[in-house]
Amino acid sequence: MTYATQKLDEEKVFKDPVHRYIHVYDQVIWDLIGTSEFQRLRRIKQLGTTYLVFHGAEHSRFNHSLGVYEIVRRIIDDIFKGRPEWDESERLVVLCAALLHDLGHGPFSHAFENVFDLDHEKFTQAILLGDTQINAILTRVSPEFPQHVSDVIAKTYGNKLVVSLISSQIDADRMDYLQRDAYFTGVSYGHFDMERILRVMRPRHNQVVIKESGMHAVEDYIMSRYQMYWQVYFHPVSRSAEVILTKALHRAKELSLSGYQFAYEPHHFKNFFNHSFSLKDYIALDEGIVMMYFQEWMDEEDKILADLCDRFVNRRLFQYIEFDPAKDYRKLVELEQLFKEAGINPEYYLVFDSSSDLPYDFYRPGEEDERVPIHLLMPNDDLRELSRSSDIVQAISGKRRTDHKLYFPQDLLKQDAEINSVKKQILHLLSGKS
Ligand code: CA
């Protein structure tokens, strides 16, 4: 028996609140879970700053990664196995890709990537292919195996059916995070009948298709996703926390590059500030470390850094208004000027933020971000694109919805507003009564 096919003497199970149990049979999977790079995902929250709005949302990327693995395992072991269109020799590569697809996420991913101009997908590749415990295990399977796992995650792998299990408009990644995020936030959206969807999934040439009888379960899944985006993922208050986090990191970077003497030196960030970091520096970061710096920096001499860190740690968030950049651009210029006059740095305290989502799309050849649509398998064995059969899906197909907000610290503006005519003017402009 080779390492690739080696089974554990006894199956291992993880108790999971969403899937009840997560089953591990393969030695390779068990070894991967035990690596320091995978264990690090316990210290990175799945939903970043969302816990400041939905206090239950403290679950980690470790939880989610095991969940994606379990969904893929069930699809291939319970549904696909033995079907002529499924190549059983792809089993291990797709299980590894499912388990490891989020490996490169850093602390508070979006804020961090934004400030340091990083891309978590590149780090996933780097951890798979670099000098890591993960790479050593994958290489034991075969010398080419790390690259194969990496290709599945990067969607460049030759077998597109394998890719579509992890990245498509109905993949194991989405099915896990919707249910898991709904469970931990406590919202009633996000639930759908995954058991039904799994039972009607079929392997077909280069993609997973859904038997027509499962259409309503898929409609429900797409609506769940739509609602989760607007009710949870784009929640304006958690975006406020993300804005503050981003600006605090930004301030620390500015100060460091300008030679500021920190009372508490940013050792973990130094190499990121001057773009000389290594993979080891990146893996060393987690959210506990970021929070430690923020707590220390609440006492920094620099008032902006101290204030932003205090706001994040103690949840003193920014207020926001709806803001249409096309229509209100001049107002933004005017506000920036007034902020300066009031002694409040607009670079850190007046922040425009947009969120946008496309809930489902049919195939548009030649367009950027070409999406493989969901196909229904009709009783006569033909394939039919979902929005051609479903009125509900058709209604939201190809429609991008965008939300723009302008964030600012109401408390700083209200301070002395009676005697400070500039602040009064700003508050008036922000109230929309101009
Ligand atoms: Ca994911």
Image (cartoon, rainbow, N blue to C red):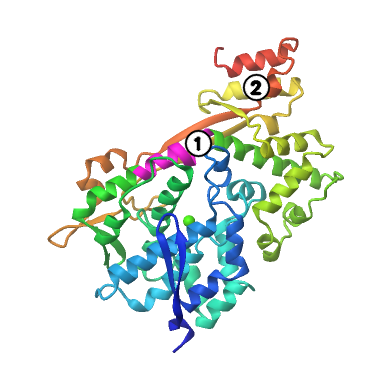
> Helix, strand or loop at disc 2?
helix
Check disc 1 and give the amino acid type. Answer: His
Foreground of the two, 145 or 328 = 145
Q: Quadrant of residue 319?
A: top right
Whether the residue under disc 1 has CB within 8 Å of ligand 1 = no
Q: Position of residue 256 (x, y in %)?
A: 80, 47
**Residue 93 relative to residue 240: left or right:** left
- Mark 1, residues whose alpha carbon is within 10 Å: few (<14), some, or many (≥20)? some
Q: Which residue is mark 1?
A: 235
Q: Which residue is mark 2?
A: 335
Check disc 2 and give the amino acid type. Answer: Leu
Q: Position of residue 273 (x, y in %)?
A: 74, 51
Q: Specify start and end residues of the magenta stretch as a single range.
A: 224-236
Is 46 part of what is drawn in magenta? no
Q: Position of residue 419 (x, y in %)?
A: 75, 10
Foreground of the two, 143 or 237 = 237
In this picture, is 11 found above or below 309? below
Picture residue at 53% right of the left edge, 26% below the top: 323
- Per the picture, the main secondary structure of the magenta-coloured stretch is helix
Picture residue at 72% right of the left edge, 39% below the top: 309
Which mark is first along the chain, 1 or 2? 1
Q: Is residue 335 visible?
A: yes
**Residue 32 relative to residue 290: left or right:** left
Give the number of the disc on residue 351: none
In this picture, is 9 found above or below 404? below
Q: Quadrant of the C terminus?
A: top right
Q: Quadrant of the N terminus?
A: bottom left
